[in-house]
Amino acid sequence: MDTPPKTDITAALNRVLATHKERLRSKNHWAGLAKIPATTVLDAFKGANSTIDTLTKLAEGAGLTLAELLAYGDPDWQVQVKTRNTFRSWTIDEVEGLIRALERRSGPQDAGAS
């Protein structure tokens, strides 16, 4: 059984910084937005094991959720980010409509199928 590719935190941080440069400006500025020491941010960029708390604060400083920040580290990060940005703008009614459409499309499952 193949294991899914691992999220690359360092790549995610570099991609977020590059794509959100106008807001984040620099690693030091991002540290200020995240309200964490600059050394903690620099360590994260060097690949040090960052805590979930640190990554969450970095995400919030960038105006993202932790899941959105981590999407930048996926091998297919561009698709992940585009998809998250698309669904982020949807209303709850649009999401519920999509769920209903998918449920109708899948239809009742054949009990004898394996």
Image: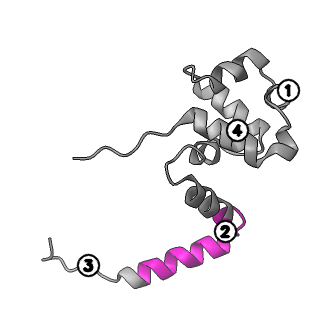
Label 2 sits on residue: 92
Label 1 sits on residue: 32
Q: Amino acid at mark 2?
A: Ile
Marks 4 and 1, how far apart at CA: 12 Å
Mark 2, secondary structure of its residue: helix
Dot 3 crowding, Cα within 10 Å, few <14, some 14–19, many 20+: few
Indicate the quadrant where residue 107 lies.
bottom left
Which numbered circle lies on residue 109?
3
Label 4 sits on residue: 59
Q: Amino acid at mark 4?
A: Ala
Q: Amino acid at mark 1?
A: Gly
**Which residue: 72% across, 66% down?**
89
**With respect to residue 98, does 41 lie above or below?**
above
Mark 4, secondary structure of its residue: helix
Label located before the other in sequence (3 or 1): 1
Q: Amino acid at mark 3?
A: Gln
Inspect the magenta stretch and tell me whether residue 113 lies in it.
no
- Residue 113, given in percent of the width and then of the height, sits at 15, 76
